Image (spheres, rainbow, N blue to C red):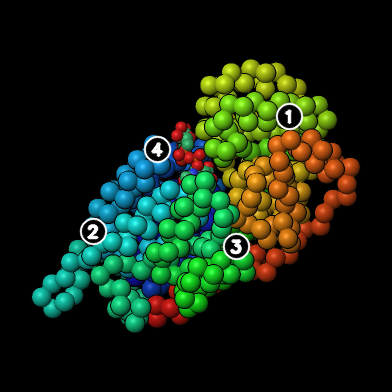
Amino acid sequence: MLIHLICAARPNFMKVAPLYHALKQEAWAAPIIVHTGQHYDLNMSDAFFQDLGLPEPQTHLGVGSGTHAEQTGKVMMTYEKVLFKDFPDLVIVVGDVNSTAACTLAASKVFYPRDKANKIRTPDRRFEPSDGAQAYQPSPMSYKLAHRPIIAHLEAGLRSFDRTMPEEINRIVTDALADILWTPSPDADENLLREGVPPDKIHRVGNIMIDSLEMLRESIESQTSYKELELSPGQYGVVTLHRPSNVDNAETLTLLTGLLEGISHEVPLVFPIHPRTKKNLERCGLLPSLNHCNGLRLLEPLNYIRFMNLVFNCRFAMTDSGGIQEETTYLGIPCLTLRENTERPITITQGTNHLCRVEDLEDKVAEILNGPRPEAKKIDLWDGKTAKRIVESLKKLLGA
Ligand code: UD1
């Protein structure tokens, strides 16, 4: 069974890796990695492949940056060609980036050509099951969809209910079209059911990000990133910012950086800067004063293991990232999320995450510094075994 695993941008790699490794163990599965090229800098892409033990992507679409429509359109056009070259049986998309929605749209609309015997005219498959492997027996589901690949969405059902976020549009489009919806938490199941999704499409498998964290725990713990930065464990904060709502507007960005400077006089902060944020800091002339701020360590984007070492050892995180809300909850680290909403409410109701308005940031940091350290929270199915559950779910659904 030929499986395309689509990855595109930094947070996708941690979701694809555990599944790729798990599928590689299965005789019936031939997983191949398709990289759309949405993220392309060495430290936004290749460094993650290395850390996560992923091979070079077998297919690279080289799409790069652009406006939303340009990027989505380019991914659709290039990926459609790959679909007609590989004829995958299954396309797995992850998360909520533009490439996730674009590949889902492209795969939904392909119509595989058939020969006179009504068989799909596949080209010579480049990835045959190895000798002795069980031949793939198509299931009723794959017969029904024989004109196109089955599409599965990993991290389905998350909703911020804020359609000003491009990611929310991507989530809605992807979930509306995908055939199999793998969810991380009960709220995601409820969102999908409320939208009228048939229950038999929804499969709660847990949080795949935790699989990557557990897979690399030893390497993360033996890293010395925080020491190299002369930071002491439990005595500094990690900052990440990249959402357009925080970094694209000059006024908001100026306010935020002023606050970070102030907070860094109280507690050291380490801030790996996303390329979008760096561009905007440069455009607004904010970099020089940040650079001169003693308590603030500005860094280039970091690879997964080094970054997670900083998170493991920090006192708190300030972020607008989705993944960091989940990782800090799992590790029991307070997280201030600089957003008005989150598509991951379980990190608030059961975890250590707090939504924080920019104007409340200083007070919230003081509360954390003066308060007790929270305990690590156990959330059902956030246990490092999500990839295994997905493989089992596939075996059942596809008769593999
Ligand atoms: C994208 C995702 C977002 C995800 C984030 C993680 C969408 C709509 N957004 O946002 O959901 O949380 O990735 O990082 O899909 N750039 C580089 N080098 C790179 C990649 C980007 O310099 O390797 C710069 C380019 O100037 C680009 C800008 O960053 O225009 C933004 O990149 P883009 O992929 O469009 O969006 P992100 O903000 O990274």
Depth check, mark 2 against mark 4: the one in front is 4
Residue 14 visible within the image:
yes
Q: Quadrant of the N terminus?
A: bottom left
Left or right: 53, with 383 as reference point:
left
Q: Quadrant of the C terminus?
A: bottom left
The residue pinned by badge 4 equals 67
The residue pinned by badge 2 equals 84
Depth check, mark 3 against mark 1: the one in front is 1
Who's the residue at 81% across and 57% down the image? 375
Who's the residue at 51% across and 37% down the image? 43
Who's the residue at 47% across and 49% down the image? 97
Circle 1: residue type: Leu
- Do residues under tags 2 and 4 come within 8 Å of each other at their CB atoms? no
Tell me the distance, in whole angstroms, between the alpha carbons under discs 2 and 3. 32 Å
Circle 3: residue type: Asn
- Nearer the N terminus, badge 2 or badge 3? 2
